[in-house]
Image: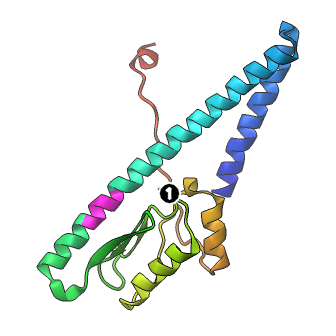
Amino acid sequence: VVRHAAGQLADRFQLLQMAQLLLRPLALGDRGQQLVMGMLQLGGALAQLRLLTLARRLEMAEGRGNASYVDAKARLDPASGALWKDIGGTHAMFAGVGSPITQTFGLGLHQPLVDKDLDAIERFFRLRGSGVFHEVCPLSGVDVSTLLAARGYRPCEMSNVLFRTIDPEADAH
């Protein structure tokens, strides 16, 4: 993930360098070049925002599906202790010790992850006799990874969703 994120930054940096080289001969002057460079940077920021919005939607959809499973399990087997809870914008799901559903979804993706919320999430799982497992989206940011690492968490799986914008015009050529 770090290599991927660094690669994206390097690519954007290279794009900006190329733009600077291409703009010099146009004699736009410093102000004109600054304007064009600002527009390029804004385009990159908007692309990142679109990616984050998509990531939030996908994470929310997965979380809803798992919450429905947990609700159904709780109805069918009340003794299971199945329960989910929103803690600081993160869905904490408990579907039984050892269940692949027993984990968090959306950690730090919908609002900043803070110590008190992470304490509450850990308490939620430990009160049910479960380990604490977090599914973390790479777009949740470095702050989330730093906080988790400071508490001794380590990644056990990396998942990415690849997508392609569908453009009928471009596909027709």
Which residue is at the far front? 116
Residue 14: image location, x then y, percent:
78, 33
Picture coordinates of residue 125, whole percent (x, y): 41, 83
- In the displayed structure, 128 sits above or below 135; it is below
- Above or below, 67 against 32 in this view is below
Quadrant of image for the N terminus: bottom right
- Residue 75 relative to residue 48: left or right: left
Residue at left offset 25%, top offset 85%: 81
- Is residue 64 one of those drawn in magenta? yes
Front-most of residues 136 and 127 = 127
Residues in magenta? 62-67
153 within the magenta span: no
User: What percent of the width, then of the height, locates residue 93?
Assistant: 35, 73
Any part of residue 54 in sight: yes
Name which residue lies at 83% across and 10% down.
28
* Apparent side of residue 66 relative to residue 172 in the rendered image (left or right): left
